[in-house]
Image (spheres, grey):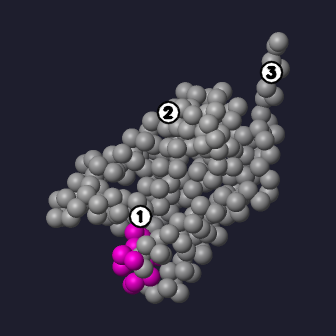
Amino acid sequence: MKDQIACKPALATLAVISWAGVLLQFWLSINLALANGKTVGDGIVVFFGYFTVLTNLFVALAATMPLIAGFSRLGRWFGKPMVLGSATVSILMVGITYLLLLRNVWQPQGLQLLADIVLHYVVPILALAYWLAFPPRSKLGVLAPLAWCLYPMGYFVYVFARGELLGSYPYYFIDATSLGYSKAMLNSFGLLISFIALGAAVLAVTTLRNRFRTPASPVRR
C-alpha cells in the first residue's frame, strides 16, 4: 500500500486511461447492440464476456481503489502487491494474446480502433511500466504466478458456463460450439500454462529490479 500512496500521479494516470478505455468500449458495445436491433441488456451481456474488458476493469479498480478508498477494506485489498501483480500479468496476457491471435481477425475503425488501441496496447504498457517503476517492496514468493492464475482460471469457468447458457463464446480459440469441448479445454489449458510462464517472468524481473532498487531514505521524526 505504501508504494501506491507514494506514486499517486502515476497510479492516477493508469486509472484514468484504463477507465477511459473501458467506458468507451461500453458505450460502443451498447451502440452496436442497438444498431443490430438488440437491447441494451444484450450489449451489456456481450461487453462483460470479454477477458479484455474484465481485465482492463480489474486494472482500473486496482489503480483507483487505493487512491479513493485506501483506508477501506476494499481499498486495502486492491492495494495489495499480489492483487496488483495479478492485474499486471493479466493485462500483459491481454496484450500478448491480442497481438499474436486476434489483431488480424478484425479491422476496427474510428472510435472502435481507439478503444482497441487503449485496451490492448496502452493499458498493458502503462501497467507494466508502473509495476517496473514501483515494484512492491514486500517479497512475493515463488508461488505468486500460481496465485495470479486464479483470475484467468475463474474466467474460463465463467466463460464456459456462459457459453453453455448463451450458445456463444467471445473468442474463437475457446469456442466449444465450433471446436468441441476437448479442443476448447486444451486451448484454455495452454493459455493457463502461458499465463503462469508470463507470471514467472514478471516475478523474476521484479526480483531482479528490487535487488538494484535504491533503499528508501529513513523517515525523520
Task: Find residue 51 and report its horizontal and vertical position in percent.
Answer: 47, 61
Of the pair 204 and 59, the residue shown nearer to us: 59
Residue 173 drawn in magenta: yes
Q: Residue at x 52, y 50 (%)?
A: 58
Can you say whether 4 is above or below 205 in the image? above
Q: Secondary structure at mark 3?
A: loop
Disc 3 marks which residue?
A: 217
Q: Secondary structure at mark 1?
A: loop
In the picture, measured across the screen, residue 113 lies left or right of residue 171, that is left
Asked whether residue 130 appears in the rendered view, the answer is no
The N terminus is located in which quarter? top right
Kindly identify the amino acid type of the residue bearing the numbered disc 3: Ser
Of the pair 212 and 44, the residue shown nearer to us: 44
- Per the model, the C-alpha gap separating discs 2 and 3 is 25 Å
Which region shows up in magenta?
165-178
Of the pair 116 and 48, the residue shown nearer to us: 48
Kindly identify the amino acid type of the residue bearing the numbered disc 1: Gly
Image quadrant assignment for residue 130 = top right
In the picture, measured across the screen, residue 106 lies left or right of residue 192, that is left
Sequence order check, earlier mark of 1 and 2? 2
Task: Find residue 31 and report its horizontal and vertical position in percent.
Answer: 22, 54
Give the mark toward the camera: 1 or 3: 1
Q: Secondary structure at mark 2?
A: helix
Q: What numbered label is drawn on residue 13?
A: 2
Q: Residue furthest top?
A: 221
Sequence order check, earlier mark of 2 and 3? 2
Can you say whether 202 is above or below 211 in the image? below
Sequence order check, earlier mark of 1 and 3? 1
User: Mark 1, residues whose alpha carbon is within 10 Å: few (<14), some, or many (≥20)?
Assistant: some
Disc 1 marks which residue?
A: 49
